[in-house]
Image: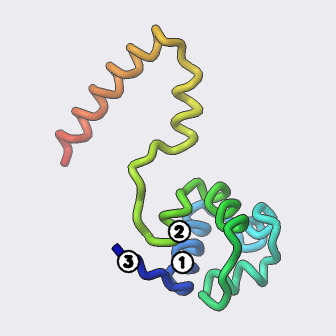
Amino acid sequence: MEVKMSYKDIGFRIRSLREANCYTRDALAEKVDISAKFLYEIEVGKKGFTVEILYKISKALNVSSDYILTGNESNKIPEKMVDVLECFSPNQMGRVQDILKVVHELCVGDV
């Protein structure tokens, strides 16, 4: 399966995510350790970027690099959710699982 990636589409996703996370261009650029000008050029599709920058952007925006590159959302559990779940003891995890099942049933019922 061939996936077509365009700098414009990638840049658009980064800008949309940046805005959804209430980051200014300057703030995200600082967090990723690049200039605001370079981030602008990425967002408008004028420039590509390294894997290291992709990694930093995806971490800062809390999304997978796959989503940034292709627009496809993965079914991977978000890292923040994993961090919360890791705080529970094995005994507590049983109760957490029961609660999540109820939440899932409520959500599916709303669809």
Q: Is residue 51 left or right of residue 27?
A: left
Q: Is residue 89 above or below residue 86?
A: above
Task: Write the residue at 54% across / 57% down.
Answer: 63
Counting from the top left corner in percent of width and height, residue 97 is at 36, 22
Disc 3 residue type? Glu
Q: Residue at x 67, y 57 (%)?
A: 60
Which of pointers 3 and 2 indicates the residue nearer the eye?
3
Q: Which quadrant holds residue 54?
A: bottom right
The amino acid pointed to by label 2 is Ile
Residue at the disc numbered 3: 2
Q: Looking at numbered disc 1 in the image, what kind of residue is underneath it?
A: Ile
- Residue at disc 1, secondary structure: helix
How far is mark 3 from mark 2, CA to CA? Answer: 16 Å
The mark nearer the N terminus, 1 or 2, is: 1
Q: CA distance from mark 1 to mark 2?
A: 6 Å
- The total number of labels drawn is 3
Nearest to the eye among marks 1 and 3: give it. 3
Q: Residue at x 59, y 69 (%)?
A: 19
Does the CB distance between marks 1 and 2 fall below 8 Å?
yes
Which quadrant of the figure has residue 40? bottom right
Residue 16 rendering spot, x and y as whole percentages: 54, 72
Q: Is residue 84 above or below residue 96?
A: below
Residue 93 found in image quarter: top left
Find residue 41 and report its horizontal and vertical position in percent. Answer: 69, 86
Q: Which residue, given by chain and number where applicable, does mark 2 sit on?
A: 68
- Residue 54: mark in rendering: none
N-terminal of the pair, mark 3 or mark 2, is 3
State the mark number for residue 10: 1
Q: Could you say which is closer to the camera, residue 29 or residue 5?
A: 5
First reached walking from the N terminus: tag 1 or tag 3: 3
23 sits to left or right of 68: right
Q: Secondary structure at mark 2?
A: helix
